[in-house]
Image (cartoon, rainbow, N blue to C red):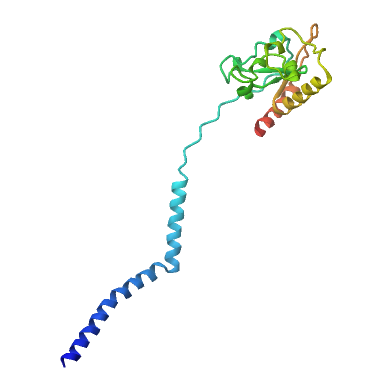
């Protein structure tokens, strides 16, 4: 009799120990149900959007100078635009002449500003320097430079630089030869150049 009682107690204990395992399995199955999995993934997605969306605001871009009204320049007038004034102001505007054409390179200040590698060309005719691959003082002139002593290869280099400047920077006028009169540009030409300037700004 005691033997049967002992077996009955063992069976009863086994059932009581198995019960919690059955309960844990049921809880796990309930958590892994399709609707609960969907809600869990939804919560994780919303959390990611909230945390990921909190990015630091980017610093506002510096305002650029408005397009310059077209005009022609003597070498002496061009020298006033050497970029030594306050950046982003009219006094900080940088002009460079290449093959008789004057370009506003103010947005290329890192290259043509006072501290840039080509800063020596700011406010000057850069044709000789670009044609001879020189950034020495001997490559610039205070007066008009007719470049008559340059060879065909140097002229080809100048024309290549001229094309690059035309594609990237605003054309603002001509470099005047001695005795040459300035051209009176129309408002229509200024509007056209302003539109081209906006397009170049978008491409940068």
**Relative side of 50 to 155, left or right:** left
In the rendered image, residue 100, in percent from the top left (x then y), is placed at 77, 16
In the rendered image, residue 26, in percent from the top left (x then y), is placed at 35, 73
Q: Quadrant of residue 132?
A: top right
Q: Nearer the viewer, residue 190 or 51?
A: 51
In the image, residue 55 above or below residue 132: below
Residue 56 appears in the picture as rendered: yes
Which residue corresponds to the image point at 70% horizontal and 11% vertical from the top-left? 138
Q: Quadrant of residue 86?
A: top right
Q: Nearer the viewer, residue 78 or 120?
A: 120
Which residue corresponds to the image point at 15% horizontal and 90% vertical from the top-left? 2
Q: Nearer the viewer, residue 93 or 5?
A: 5
Residue 65 appears in the picture as rendered: no
Q: Residue furthest left?
A: 2
Q: Residue furthest bottom?
A: 1
**Relative side of 190 to 107, left or right:** right
In the rendered image, residue 119, in percent from the top left (x then y), is placed at 63, 17
Q: Quadrant of residue 143?
A: top right
**Relative side of 31 to 197, left or right:** left
User: Which quadrant, please, contains the C terminus?
Assistant: top right
> How many marks overall?
0
Which residue corresponds to the image point at 69% horizontal and 9% vertical from the top-left? 77
Which residue corresponds to the image point at 45% horizontal and 68% vertical from the top-left? 34
In the rendered image, residue 148, in percent from the top left (x then y), is placed at 82, 12
In the image, residue 115 above or below residue 196: above
């Amino acid at each position: 009799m005691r033997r049967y009682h002992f077996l009955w107690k063992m069976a009863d204990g086994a059932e009581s120990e198995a019960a919690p395992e059955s309960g844990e399995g049921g809880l796990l199955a309930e958590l892994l149900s399709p609707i609960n999995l969907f809600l869990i993934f939804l919560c994780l997605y919303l959390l990611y959007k909230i945390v990921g969306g909190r990015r630091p605001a980017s610093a506002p871009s510096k305002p650029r100078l408005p397009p310059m009204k077209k005009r022609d320049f003597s070498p002496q007038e061009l020298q006033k635009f050497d970029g030594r004034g306050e950046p982003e102001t009219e006094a900080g505007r940088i002009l460079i002449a290449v093959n008789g054409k004057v370009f506003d390179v103010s947005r290329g200040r890192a290259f043509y500003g006072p501290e840039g590698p080509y800063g020596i060309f700011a406010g000057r005719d850069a044709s000789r320097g670009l044609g001879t691959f020189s950034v020495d003082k001997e490559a610039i002139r205070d007066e008009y430079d007719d470049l008559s002593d340059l060879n065909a290869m140097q002229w080809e280099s100048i024309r290549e630089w001229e094309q690059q400047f035309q594609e990237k920077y605003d054309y603002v006028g001509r470099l005047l030869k001695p005795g040459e009169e300035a051209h009176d540009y129309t408002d229509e030409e200024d509007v056209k150049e302003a539109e081209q300037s906006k397009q170049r700004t978008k491409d940068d």
